[in-house]
Each structure stands twice: as C-alpha cells, then as structure tokens.
C-alpha cells in the first residue's frame, strides 16, 4: 500500500508544480513593454526576467516576465549570457489575471534588434 501511495505521489507532483497559461495569464490582455533589465532568473521550470518600465509621467514600475524553460530557450538560440542586467529591451506578451505587474513573455527584442520567442502564443 505504501508503494502505491508513493508512486501516485511521485507521478502527480510534477503536475501540481506546473500551471496552465490561462489560469495565470489573460490571452485577451496583450502587453507591450520597453524597459531596463534589472534581474534574470535562469531557472526551471521557467525563466523569469524583470524590467523597469517608465510610464509617461516618469514613474518606474518593475515587471516580472515569465518565459520558456532554460533548455527550450537554449534550443532557439537564447543563451544565458545573451541578455544582461542594464540592457534596454522590448517585450510583448500577456498580462496576468490578478492585476500584478507580471506577464507571460512572448517575444523579446534585445538591444541588437534580435528577436527571440520566449514563450508560447496565447491559446
């Protein structure tokens, strides 16, 4: 009996750890942001990077942007050292449902002009 419980626990934990796009992000709420990279978390299950975005009045807000897992990004040519803190970037994606300054990143434009898909399209 313990073995069965252990197997069930081991096979369901990865499902709990992962989330649905539409549970967190709103596919009807696109965002387009420009800002300065302040932090990069190159970790599983998804990378996060943070940018300071200035509004028209000069107020700065820090946005958290979620992207694909590191291995997926490596396969599309996005290496760990391609984006650096202090870089000016542009990002498109979808805002989170709870109103926080967080988004699912879709496309990242680096200072060189290189564009990289960093997340899936909204479904």
Image (spheres, rainbow, N blue to C red):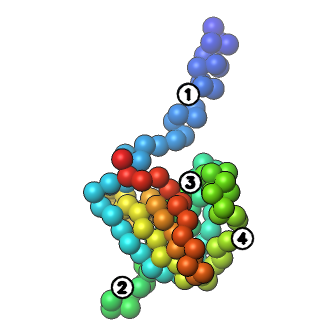
Badge 1 or badge 4: first in the primary sequence: 1
Distance, label 1 to label 3, CA atoms, is 21 Å
**Which residue was labeled with disc 3?**
68
Q: Is residue 3 among the parts visible in the rendering?
A: yes
Nearer to me, 29 or 38: 29
Classify the position of the N terminus by image quarter. Answer: top right
The numbered disc on residue 12 is 1
Q: Position of residue 24 (x, y in %)?
A: 39, 51
Secondary structure, mark 1, is: helix
**In the image, farthest residue toward the bottom:** 57
Q: Residues within 10 Å of mark 2 (few under 14, many from 20)?
A: few
Instruction: Specify whether 24 is left or right of 74.
Output: left
Query: Cα distance, mark 1 to mark 4?
Result: 34 Å
Q: Residue at x 52, y 61 (%)?
A: 117
Q: Residue at x 41, y 75 (%)?
A: 33
6 versus 98 height, above or below = above
């Amino acid at each position: 009996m313990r073995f069965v419980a252990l197997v069930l626990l081991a096979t369901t934990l990865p499902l709990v750890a992962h989330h649905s796009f539409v549970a967190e992000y709103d596919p009807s709420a696109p965002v387009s942001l420009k800002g300065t990279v302040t932090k990069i978390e190159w970790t599983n299950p998804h990378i996060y990077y943070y940018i300071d975005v200035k509004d028209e009045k000069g107020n700065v807000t820090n946005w958290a942007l979620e992207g694909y897992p590191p291995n997926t990004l490596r396969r599309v040519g996005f290496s760990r050292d391609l984006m650096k803190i202090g870089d000016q970037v542009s990002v498109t994606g979808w805002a989170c449902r709870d109103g926080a300054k967080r988004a699912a990143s879709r496309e990242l434009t680096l200072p060189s002009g290189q564009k990289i898909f960093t997340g899936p399209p909204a479904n």
